[in-house]
Image (cartoon, rainbow, N blue to C red):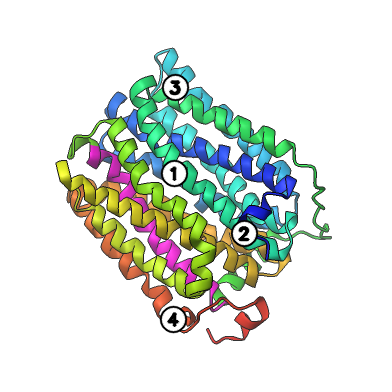
Amino acid sequence: MTTGRGILSHPDFRRLWIADLLSQLGSRLGMMAVPLLAVLTLNASTLQVSLLRTCETAAWLLLGLFAGAWVDRVRCLPVLVAADLGRALLYASIPVAAAFGVLSLPQLYVVLAATGLLTVLFDVAHSSYPPRLLSPEQLLPGNARLAANHSVAAVVGAGAGGVLVQWLTAPITIGLNALGFLWSAVWLRSIRTPEPRPAPQDRPNLRREIGEGLRYVFRHPLLRPITLNTATTMLFQAAGNAVMIVFLVREIHLSPATIGLLSMIGLLGALAASALTERISRWMGDARALLVAAIGMGFAFSLQALTRPGWGLTWYVAGTLLAAICIIVGYILQVSTRQRVCPPELQGRVSATMSFVSWGAAPIGSLLGGILGTVFGLRPTLWIAGAAMLAGSAWLIFSPFRTLRSVPTEAESLRRPA
């Protein structure tokens, strides 16, 4: 088996890995800077802040299924480059507008909605590209390396985002986000391995192709519970995240730099998870590890709801630490499971279907979080989110994952009863 270190000896995967890291860093800076900009500069309400994330993720509902069918018929690399360049231009408009004194919430909504559309195309193409670049035995270490980028970006982006907002202002920090996407596009353009164009179809039928992806996911005994669990988790994680910055600023009275640094300390667990997921998978079994990660997510958000000023901040750090570990372990194993049990010709559609169902829940969750936070308060919203995510692990508990140790191959998995 190719190790995580050995996979970086593949020159074009190394370029993909660097580009992904830059793109992830840019995204993380924006995730911290945009809501802080809305709260501190534009004096946005809880509901208005939650709508920012709703605009950013609503594209999955509009474009997710189409993107999967389309990506299965085109080369992925040009899609990745174009999406990065488009996001760079859109985010660059925010510091420009701020410099001229015309920045407003409507502009933030438009920018996030447009970048959300490009992110859908990027994410589906990015998820479908590794099987076109790597051999099957390289997929798990490759996915682990790419997931490590999520960890590094989460740690560095969270800490740097808060500090940079306090030192340089939020608009300038968002400008650095734009530079991250631009630099990512440059690295992607340097990949040299030819990507074969998928065989053209005589009569493309998007409805039929989308239906094939949907049927494969929801008839598959392993992909269906993963998808439903992820959708439940994303729904209530988005609800909690929609109010988290407002909660930390207005109830715990933290500065942007403090929020960033505390998040960075908690997210260090994601780095450990990225490095140890292969070892955990061998020790516990990838199916069992996926189940444990799903249960841990609910506990993590419940811990964050205990956050108080002073020593009570420890609960926020502990919850963030546990959530980061569970997210990374779950992400690596979910992607590897999907790539292992899905036939090559359906990779894009199955990836898009699973992302559509899970990420499609995010804008609904963000809106739900804003409503719950307005009606019941910010802390009760975090309690509700944690309890609902814990309940959502039942999709995996009452599925074949309960009796599995390891994820089987495509043919073996389809022989198991639904």
- Number of other residues with Cα within 10 Å of mark 4, as a class: few under 14, some 14 to 19, many 20 or more: few
User: Marks 1/4: CA distance?
Assistant: 31 Å
Percent position (x, y) of residue 401? 47, 78
Percent position (x, y) of residue 245? 29, 40
Q: Earlier in the sequence, mark 3 or mark 4?
A: 3
User: Marks 1/2: CA distance?
Assistant: 20 Å
The residue positioned 58% from the left and 41% from the top of the image is 118
Give the quarter of the image for residue 325: bottom left
Query: What amino acid is labelled 4 in the image?
Result: Arg
Q: Earlier in the sequence, mark 2 or mark 3?
A: 2
Q: Earlier in the sequence, mark 3 or mark 1?
A: 1
- Number of other residues with Cα within 10 Å of mark 1, as a class: few under 14, some 14 to 19, many 20 or more: many
User: Marks 2/3: CA distance?
Assistant: 36 Å
Query: What amino acid is labelled 1 in the image?
Result: Ala
Percent position (x, y) of residue 18? 62, 40
Residue 58 lies in the magenta stretch: no
Q: Are marks 2 and 4 in contact (CB under 8 Å)?
A: no
Which residue is label 2 attached to? 141
Query: What amino acid is labelled 2 in the image?
Result: Pro
Q: Are marks 3 and 4 in contact (CB under 8 Å)?
A: no
The residue range painted magenta reads 220-248
Which residue is label 3 attached to? 172
